[in-house]
């Protein structure tokens, strides 16, 4: 998406690693609303597995799920995200949770391969015994000047992380899901508008939309719902991971609201889709918290 004009919201920022680290970001992303969120037991007794829950949108989803009464476990990348992982665990433990909510666990994994996805599900089941909600959320993105930058190995790496993992996590989790369980996939506004700077990332996000629709149709008779969330620009580590530093200053300028979202503005969409009270008639759908990007075919 091309940048529009607006006041810079963020300083120039770029981190050399992929994934990047939330604790090094300036300003820090906001996983919780400054106006306190009012939970209402929407996920009481549920058990949720969130991939990439150490930081960004995933962290905020973990916190909102825990506030709604769920037990939450999440994945992170060992050696890169240990500090962020510890912070998410600390924040979840600070929440006043019902007695049915177990302590969180963090599972280190590179989800780009099948055996790691299987191991994550096995470890999760060993700890909690079931999966009611799977949130496929982990992803990477690379800035692209030219299609010549996109080597076969880079293409394979991004497709493995962003879409293979979503299939595989869904496949292995499904063995432990029952009627009433659900899967929520994180896609992006880039799937709908395209993004010339994030060429292969956009393609993976388009694949997630199609996967969501197709898998929802397959599971509809089993009573398992499959939906997705397609955020617009959000201030998170992925936006500064190996990005040109000047890009962060204009993040959000391209959308009509002329600003990026904070993660606490995105996580409630996941609560809505995870809660049977709110979304029992939703499957195969995508929610679009995107600052009014409506001039494209969204659904
Ligand atoms: P983030 O960097 O905080 O989260 C990405 C997560 O992916 C990390 O927590 C990391 O643990 C995980 N990850 C990366 N490589 C991995 C690997 N090989 N194996 C396992 N996990 C790996 O950034 P975020 O913005 O919160 O991203 C979360 C989701 O939101 C992603 O799917 C992203 O595409 C999507 N999204 C983000 C934005 C945005 O503007 N931030 C917009 C639309 C969609």
Image: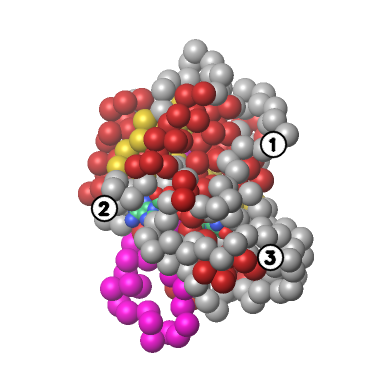
Query: Is residue 121 among what the camera can see?
Result: no
Label 2 neighbourhood size at 10 Å, few (<14), some (14-19), many (20+)? some
Between tags 1 and 3, which lies in front? 3
Q: Residues within 10 Å of mark 1 (few under 14, many from 20)?
A: few
| Above or below, 87 relative to 216 | above
Which numbered circle lies on residue 137? none
Instruction: Name which residue lies at 43% across and 51% down.
Output: 21
Is residue 181 shown above or below 294?
Answer: above
Cα separation between marks 1 and 3 = 22 Å
The magenta segment is 131-160
- The alpha-carbon separation of the residues under discs 2 and 1 comes to 39 Å
In this figure, which residue is indicated by the disc labeled 3? 8
The crowd level at tag 3 (other Cα within 10 Å; few <14, some 14-19, many 20+) is some
Q: Are marks 2 and 3 in contact (CB under 8 Å)?
A: no
Per the image, the residue denoted by label 2 is 114
Where residue 220 appears, x then y in whole percent? 53, 44
Instruction: Identify the secondary structure beneath mark 3.
Output: loop
The image quarter containing residue 130 is: top left
| Secondary element type, mark 1 | loop
In the rendered view, would you say 55 is above or below 297? above
Q: Position of residue 191 (x, y in %)?
A: 56, 67
Query: N-terminal of the two: label 2 or label 3?
Result: 3
């Amino acid at each position: 998406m091309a940048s529009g004009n607006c006041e810079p919201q963020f300083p120039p920022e770029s981190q050399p690693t992929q994934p990047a680290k939330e604790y090094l970001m300036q300003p820090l992303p906001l996983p919780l609303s400054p106006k306190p969120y009012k939970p209402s037991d929407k996920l009481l007794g549920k058990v949720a597995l969130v991939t990439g829950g150490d930081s960004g949108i995933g962290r905020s989803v973990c916190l909102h799920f825990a506030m709604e009464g769920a037990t939450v476990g999440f994945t992170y990348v060992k050696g890169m995200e240990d500090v962020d992982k510890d912070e998410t665990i600390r924040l979840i433990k600070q929440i006043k949770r019902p007695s049915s909510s177990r302590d969180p666990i963090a599972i280190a994994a590179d989800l780009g391969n099948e055996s790691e996805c299987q191991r994550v599900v096995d470890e999760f089941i060993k700890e909690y015994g079931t999966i009611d909600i799977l949130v496929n959320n982990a992803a990477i993105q690379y800035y692209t000047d030219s299609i010549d930058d996109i080597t076969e190995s880079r293409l394979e790496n991004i497709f493995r992380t962003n879409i293979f993992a979503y299939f595989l996590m869904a496949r292995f989790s499904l063995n432990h899901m029952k009627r009433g369980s659900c899967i929520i996939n994180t896609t992006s506004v880039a799937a709908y508008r395209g993004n010339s700077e994030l060429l292969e990332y956009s393609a993976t996000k388009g694949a997630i939309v199609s996967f969501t629709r197709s898998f929802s149709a397959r599971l509809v008779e089993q009573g398992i719902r499959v939906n997705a969330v397609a955020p617009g620009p959000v201030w998170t580590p992925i936006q500064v991971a190996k990005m040109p530093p000047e890009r962060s200053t204009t993040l959000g300028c391209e959308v009509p609201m002329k600003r990026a979202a904070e993660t606490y503005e995105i996580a409630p969409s996941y609560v809505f889709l995870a809660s049977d009270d709110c979304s029992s008639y939703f499957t195969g759908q995508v929610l679009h918290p995107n600052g009014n990007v409506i001039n494209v075919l969204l659904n």
